[in-house]
Image (spheres, grey):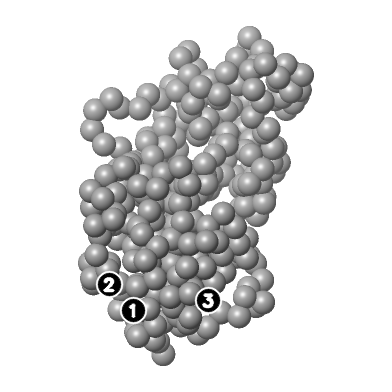
């Protein structure tokens, strides 16, 4: 049995509950995941898969790589494929299988368990995926359980009471970012509540995190210093998290941390917001106009004991 989920970070996290539902529905099955390099370690740790294959996502003209992928896919003799990516690439992968296709749960025309995204209404990615699994008889899809994530965070020297700030986002989508100056003001506000701001981001977001640290010296800057697994563990113990519409917020929310996610009109939270036990959405047309007071008013009550 094969599950396909290639990217992106937030979507991969949203699919963890589907991975777990598939494993629960097929407890004794030999299940393989086809994914991309950034998610291999999480996939292996999840306990949902017997084998994890890494897809290099070859271009259509990279014939040797495509032939190698075809040989690999055929060698496993999969009897069913759960295509959770549902795009043109995985539609092409369907064609790599021999004429006697495995059962295919996805949106490829002619597949055995066809699911087509509704063309009206608003449907969250996770809701669409849940409906897709129903076509294969899987109806018990719960909130994701990220207790499998383990990581050593001792060297990060976290304070007793802290909350996470995630000021980054896709570099080509600046309209999805709350201004760094506002994050800095929020960090300062948090210190007056007795909460240490902990800055989370990739190396590419170091400039933003450094600017916040310069404004709020009490902040702990972990930008570029944490693995995905460490972020998951840190999130479990955080008071809350505030961040833009970006991948790490999906992981933080799924780990059980209360989150406040900031959206502009550039994306629709009804389709792509994080899922978790406590998710608060603040959406304005332009994040440049979102004032500190509105975000501060939404912060959960602090527990600094």
Checking the image for residue 296, the label placed there is 2
Closer to us: 99 or 201: 201
Residue 206 percent across, percent down from the top left: 55, 61
Residue at (50% x, 34% y) in the render: 84
Q: Is residue 180 above or below residue 19?
A: below
Q: Earlier in the sequence, mark 3 or mark 1?
A: 1
Q: Are marks 2 and 1 in contact (CB under 8 Å)?
A: yes
How crowded is the residue under tag 1: few (<14 C-alpha within 10 Å), some, or many (20+)? some
Checking the image for residue 220, the label placed there is 3
Residue at (23% x, 48% y) in the render: 285
Q: Are marks 3 and 1 in contact (CB under 8 Å)?
A: no
Instruction: Classify residue 301 as left or right of residue 152.
Output: left
Q: Is residue 118 above or below residue 237?
A: above
Specify the quadrant of the image occupied by residue 188: bottom left
Residue at (56% x, 65% y) in the render: 223
- Residue 87 can be seen, yes or no: yes
Residue 275 percent across, percent down from the top left: 38, 53
Q: Earlier in the sequence, mark 2 or mark 3?
A: 3
Question: At numbered mark 2, what does the secondary structure look like: helix, strand or loop?
Answer: helix
Task: Name the residue tied to disc 1.
Answer: 189
How crowded is the residue under tag 2: few (<14 C-alpha within 10 Å), some, or many (20+)? some
Question: At numbered mark 1, what does the secondary structure look like: helix, strand or loop?
Answer: helix
Residue at (40% x, 63% y) in the render: 180
Residue reaching furthest top?
Answer: 99
Instruction: Classify residue 157 as left or right of residue 107.
Output: right
How crowded is the residue under tag 3: few (<14 C-alpha within 10 Å), some, or many (20+)? many
- Residue 235 can be seen, yes or no: no
């Amino acid at each position: 049995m094969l599950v396909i989920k290639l990217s992106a970070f937030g979507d991969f996290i949203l699919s963890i509950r589907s991975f777990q539902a598939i494993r629960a529905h097929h407890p004794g099955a030999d299940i393989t995941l086809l994914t991309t390099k950034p998610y291999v370690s999480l996939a292996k740790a999840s306990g949902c898969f017997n084998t994890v294959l890494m897809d290099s996502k070859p271009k259509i003209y990279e014939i040797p790589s495509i032939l190698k992928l075809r040989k690999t896919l055929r060698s496993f003799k999969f009897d069913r494929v759960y295509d959770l990516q549902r795009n043109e690439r995985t539609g092409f992968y369907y064609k790599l299988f021999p004429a006697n296709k495995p059962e295919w749960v996805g949106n490829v025309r002619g597949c055995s368990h066809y699911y087509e995204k509704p063309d009206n209404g608003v449907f969250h990615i996770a809701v669409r995926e849940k409906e897709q699994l129903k076509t294969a008889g899987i109806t018990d899809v719960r909130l994701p359980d990220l207790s499998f994530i383990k990581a050593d965070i001792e060297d990060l020297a976290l304070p007793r009471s802290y909350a996470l700030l995630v000021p980054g986002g896709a570099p080509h989508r600046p309209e999805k970012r709350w201004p760094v100056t506002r994050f800095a003001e929020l960090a300062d506000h948090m210190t007056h509540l007795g909460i240490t701001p902990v800055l989370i981001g990739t190396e590419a977001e170091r400039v933003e995190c450094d600017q916040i640290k310069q404004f709020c010296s009490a902040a702990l800057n972990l930008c570029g210093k944490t693995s995905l697994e460490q972020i998951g563990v840190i999130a479990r113990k955080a008071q809350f998290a505030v961040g833009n519409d970006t991948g790490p917020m999906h992981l933080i929310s799924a780990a059980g941390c209360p989150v406040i996610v900031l959206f502009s009109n550039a994306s629709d939270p009804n389709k792509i917001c994080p899922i978790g036990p406590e998710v608060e959405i603040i959406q304005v047309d332009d994040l440049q106009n979102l004032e500190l007071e509105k975000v501060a008013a939404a912060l959960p009550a602090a527990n600094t004991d």
